[in-house]
Image (cartoon, rainbow, N blue to C red):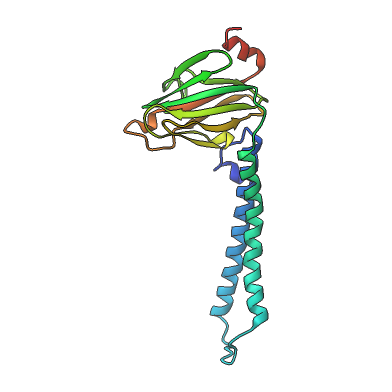
Amino acid sequence: MMIEWMNNYLTESSSSVMEQMTEFHEHAMMVMILIVIFISSIIIKVMFNKINNLKFFEQETLEIVWTSIPIFMLLTLAFPSLQILYLIEEKYASALSIKIYGHQWYWSYEYENFNLKYDSFMNNNLFRLLDVDKALVLPFKLNFRLLITSNDVIHSWTLPSSGIKMDANPGRLNLYYLFSFRTGWFYGQCSEICGVNHSFMPIKVEFVNMKKFMNHMGL
């Protein structure tokens, strides 16, 4: 029931990293709900409690308890978060390297191993402000190394279903690994305020089987 409710607000994941991000979100929300319930019950009890002990000034045991409980709660949030951060920064053996260039206001993709490069402009054939004329086509169940940069201002290549949000800085390459365990179209947008047409440079990634990918490459 909780997972179905969360799916109304979070993008359906297509990678193991995004799945762990979703699980961590649900875990953090449950911890927050328990904290709110606990604090609310204490406030209500204090408001309606008419017994006041004016001689109660200190209690070391109580101070240790109310200091230890928040520390324990923070640890339950810290360890899963550190695990996800480690997975994001982990280096994987990649089957293909893709260079991504941000422009005002479109994206360019370059397949290093196939000597293929093209621009991706927005059109509204299927989804308004999300569809493009040429998507980034990749085979699924393989790791890909993304090298992201910009030719003018700072952009941000964001694909929520894969848990990716990487800035494209001019004169600098940022590295990220992309993986998908299922086929389909996945959409994103530039999430950096890069100019007046910032909202008109969407991202579309299409994961296909190897046969369709080879046909896309003209092989």
Q: Quadrant of residue 107?
A: top left
Number of residue marks = 0
- Compared with 67, 133 (above or below) is above
Residue 126 spot, x, y in % from top left: 47, 22
- Compared with 23, 163 (above or below) is above
Q: Quadrant of residue 209?
A: top right
Q: In the displayed image of the protein, which residue is found farthest to the left?
A: 196
Q: In the displayed image of the protein, which residue is found farthest to the bottom?
A: 55
Residue 204 spot, x, y in % from top left: 50, 25
- Compared with 38, 176 (above or below) is above
The quadrant of the image that shows the C terminus is: top right
Res. 100 visible in picture: yes
Q: In the displayed image of the protein, which residue is found farthest to the top?
A: 219
Residue 96 spot, x, y in % from top left: 61, 21
Residue at x 45%, y 25% (from the top left corner): 101
Res. 4 visible in picture: no
Residue at x 62%, y 32% (from the top left corner): 14
Q: In the displayed image of the protein, which residue is found farthest to the front?
A: 171
Residue 74 spot, x, y in % from top left: 62, 60
- Compared with 51, 23 (above or below) is above
Q: Nearer the viewer, residue 80 or 12?
A: 80
Q: Nearer the viewer, residue 39 or 201?
A: 201
